Image: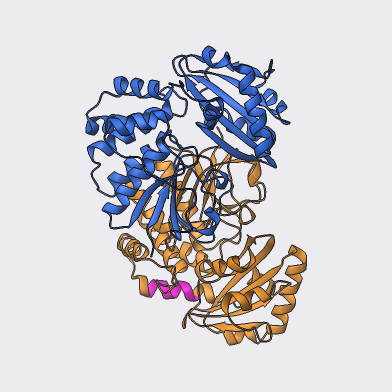
Chain colours: A blue, B orange
């Protein structure tokens, strides 16, 4: 049998890259033949973590069926967020912490989803269940994933289990989560040298909500005003994406990682859903949502309620 | 918050009833407020197990949204196999061992599926992870579920984990699995006094395969010839179900639990899929499939490959 490939979602973030690396390590320790790959290059935050812990980014693939017949998904399950030829291979396992949608299999599989803040938190549990020690550098990456997904434990998606796992992993990795974490988040929020198109694609995910195709992109920053100085250019770029991807709605979250608020920019035929979902009125296509930092918990379910 | 209802699939079998009872017990021991319910009365096999271990069948419900806003699914996930108003409640957890299809949520959830032969095998593991002791009578029911789903460990769905779990549970329940198991299976295969319509509905499940709606029913027996004496009446009843349920295909498995073979009867517009899937030719709408006893592993994936 060919090697099982393990990968996370398109536009990879830290949790998606790290979970593929960590789970592949665990599976191989248990005697399986797997390789962590990625559906894109690491972003600056993930690269910071990889450099800090001296690990290499996974090989980037754009298709998988030419080299394997079996894959394991981490940190996602929705088809449109996965590799382009996902329909041509068997999904033998999924480890995830998102809603389940647009996913189906012909055969029974191992599916482990928990409503925690980060896939790495679930993996930390599975390492213990399987009695496999986590190497220092992988523990460091898993800690990075939890810090990334929880915005240093401040996101409403962050659970007691995430905090507990982060403590354990920080102990193994021998770093101070608060100090290391803020440095890592700032590295990720360094947007200099990136085109507007790159910024919109940094952390963008598509969702099917009823018959609507919705893209929700998120940009973390320490200075939203700097971004909004280019508001017109950003809107033009979003409009181009809407046409190109045939989207019904594009939502951009500009998230201030220091104040933990997001400015939302919404465009597309179904933009009215934003007003309804959050009981607000967009002005100039945008609005400040105080305390909103989580796409998964504070944006997607609310839009799904209106659009599905 | 209202009580969380826990239930398995329509046309309940032993694993579905038992898993609801066992998981509700576990959740309540952990401080939750749950109740096991069922989408139908227990069949004769399940009733035998309930009587043997002195436990009551769960309350039967046909809808849930009138009494709760949150449910836990065991032993199934596909919408068409679940309660009629499943779309009106939140699914907070799923414990299952089937393929995933026609299932989606707006929110993250706890989803635990493993490719083992029986939901009770997964529950046995979760009891240990949570450090909760399994009471003798619930262990007896969980053993019954494994025996039922594995046809006394002879089905190809039966894994080493199922056998191991059955051994542990038999120890707690203080029964000999082989002796108790055969008595239980025979009680389930006692078809006397049942109308043909009742026999067809005993263990019937619907599947969406591509745009096709397929129903696969299974009847366990120790004497297939006795059933086939009424072949014409059976086919007439199947044709009536096809019209009533707007099915594209109906597959009946008449499974001999002593020889572990099944006679398949297929009817419906898409009946040609059976010939293709199993590389056989139906004669008089039927064929013997030697060694085939598992709908999940030996019928559904093969038909899905052709029809989806």
- Residue B130 seen in the figure: no
Magenta-highlighted stretch: main secondary structure? helix
Residue A51 lies in quadrant = top left
Q: Which residue is drawn at 42% across and 64% down?
A: B146
Depth order, front residue of B302/B292: B302
Residue A159 lies in quadrant = top left
Residue B204 location (% of width, % of height): 61, 66
Residue A154 location (% of width, % of height): 42, 22
Q: On screen, B31 above or below A1? A: above
Q: On screen, B293 above or below A294? A: below
Residue A71 location (% of width, % of height): 44, 54
Q: Which residue is drawn at 35% across and 46% down?
A: A23
Q: In this view, does A274 lie to the left or right of B152?
A: right
Q: Is residue B13 left or right of residue A250?
A: left
Depth order, front residue of B1/A215: A215
Q: Could you tell me which quadrant the N terminus of chain B lies in? A: top right
Residue B282 lies in quadrant = bottom right
Q: On screen, A8 above or below B121? A: above
Residue B239 location (% of width, % of height): 75, 73
Residue A71 counted in the magenta span: no
The residue range painted magenta reads: B179-186
Q: Residue at x 40, y 34 (%)?
A: A14
Q: Could you tell me which quadrant the C terminus of chain B lies in? A: bottom right
Q: On screen, A129 above or below A261? A: below
- Residue A292 seen in the figure: yes
Residue B184 counted in the magenta span: yes
């Amino acid at each position: 049998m060919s090697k099982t490939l393990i990968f996370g979602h398109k536009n990879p973030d830290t949790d998606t890259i790290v979970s593929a690396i960590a789970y592949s390590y665990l599976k191989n320790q248990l005697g399986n033949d797997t390789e962590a790959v990625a559906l894109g290059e690491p972003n600056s935050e993930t690269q910071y973590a990889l450099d800090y812990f001296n690990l290499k980014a996974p090989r980037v693939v754009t298709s998988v069926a030419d080299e394997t017949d079996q894959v394991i998904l981490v940190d996602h399950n929705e088809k449109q967020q996965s590799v382009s030829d996902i329909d041509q291979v068997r999904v033998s396992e999924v480890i995830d912490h998102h809603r389940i949608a647009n996913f189906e299999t012909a055969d029974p599989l191992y599916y482990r989803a928990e409503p925690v803040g980060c896939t790495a938190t679930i993996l930390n549990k599975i390492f213990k269940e399987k009695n496999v020690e986590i190497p220092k550098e992988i523990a460091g990456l898993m800690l990075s994933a939890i810090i990334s997904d929880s915005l240093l434990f401040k996101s409403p998606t962050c659970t007691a289990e995430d905090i507990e796992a982060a403590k354990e992993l920080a102990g193994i990795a021998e770093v101070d989560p608060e100090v290391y974490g803020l440095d890592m988040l700032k590295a990720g929020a360094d947007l200099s040298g990136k085109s507007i198109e790159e910024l919109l694609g940094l952390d963008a995910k598509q969702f099917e909500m009823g018959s609507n195709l919705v893209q929700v992109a998120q940009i973390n920053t320490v200075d939203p005003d700097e971004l909004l100085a280019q508001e017109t250019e950003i809107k033009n770029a979003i409009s181009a994406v809407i046409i190109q991807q045939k989207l019904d709605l594009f939502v951009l979250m500009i998230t201030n990682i220091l104040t933990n608020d997001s400015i939302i920019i919404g465009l597309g035929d179904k933009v009215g859903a934003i007003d309804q979902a959050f009981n607000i009125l967009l002005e100039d296509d945008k609005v400040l949502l105080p305390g909103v930092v989580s796409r998964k918990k504070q944006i997607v379910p609310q839009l799904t309620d209106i659009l599905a």
